[in-house]
Amino acid sequence: LTVLNAGRRYLKAEDLSGKVFVTSGLGGMSGAQAKAAVIAGCVGIIAEVDEAALLKRHKQGWLMEISDNLDHCIARLRDARKNKIALSLGYHGNVVDLWERLVYELDTTGELLVDLGSDQTSCHNPFSGGYYPVQLGFEEAKQLLSTNPGKFRTLVQESLKRHVAAINRLADKGMFFWDYGNAFLLEAQRAGADVEKRGANKTEFRYPSYVQHIMG
């Protein structure tokens, strides 16, 4: 319902076939995102750093495909988008790499390959394993978290700034991004990312929340 209503409100579309939804997280509640994309009829690309979560969703049948190769992910995205095929593709990697690759595609080809975007990393708990920084691999980041949590925190905040910068670039070209109530925008703001709403007070973000703006 969230994906469908985001399409209805922000894309003015009842039919999401050929539309692309990019997000992250396949554990816990976020595991439903892959299934939601296919039910809605769109192309869902969901990034996840933890291979165990990817394999679990794939085994359940909630996730159709898995790849750790961004070239392959972009090729599958283009094909499914062009042919209006419903697809859920799990990218085994960091979502920041995926967002930055979509910016690269925009800069080099002029194509905006994503229509809807969100995030379901556990940003309510970003410094204890809820969000993994793009600068490190999953295992390396887990090790740093246990040995140097202060450094881990710094890398998370740097990663959040890169994360938002890529989203902002794509949103400026017409992608619609929303907050999933996971404290992503709040933690990004605390990290110094550009998420404040222009001309509004500091408690308002430039992107809507799914609670008030989509489900409400």
Image: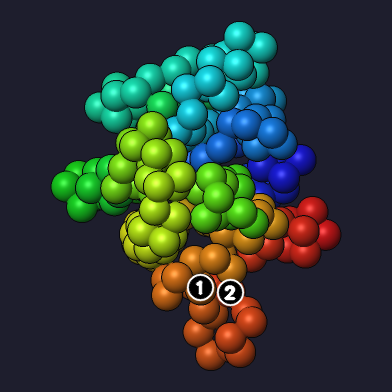
> Mark 2 packing: few (<14 Cα in 10 Å), some, or many (20+)?
some
Q: On residue 205, which mark appears?
A: 2
Picture coordinates of residue 4, whole percent (x, y): 70, 41
Residue denoted by label 1:
189
Give residue 68's quadrant in the image. top left
Which residue is at 39% across, 39% downward? 143
Which residue is at 83% across, 59% downward? 216
Q: On residue 2, which mark appears?
A: none
Q: Earlier in the sequence, mark 1 or mark 2?
A: 1
Viewer-nearest of labels 1 and 2? Answer: 1
Direction from residue 68 to residue 59 in the image, left or right: right
Picture coordinates of residue 9, whole percent (x, y): 68, 55
Which residue is at 55% across, 50% downward? 128
Q: Nearer the viewer, residue 18 or 116?
A: 116
Residue 112 visible in the current orientation: yes
Vertical order, 160 against 130 (above or below): below
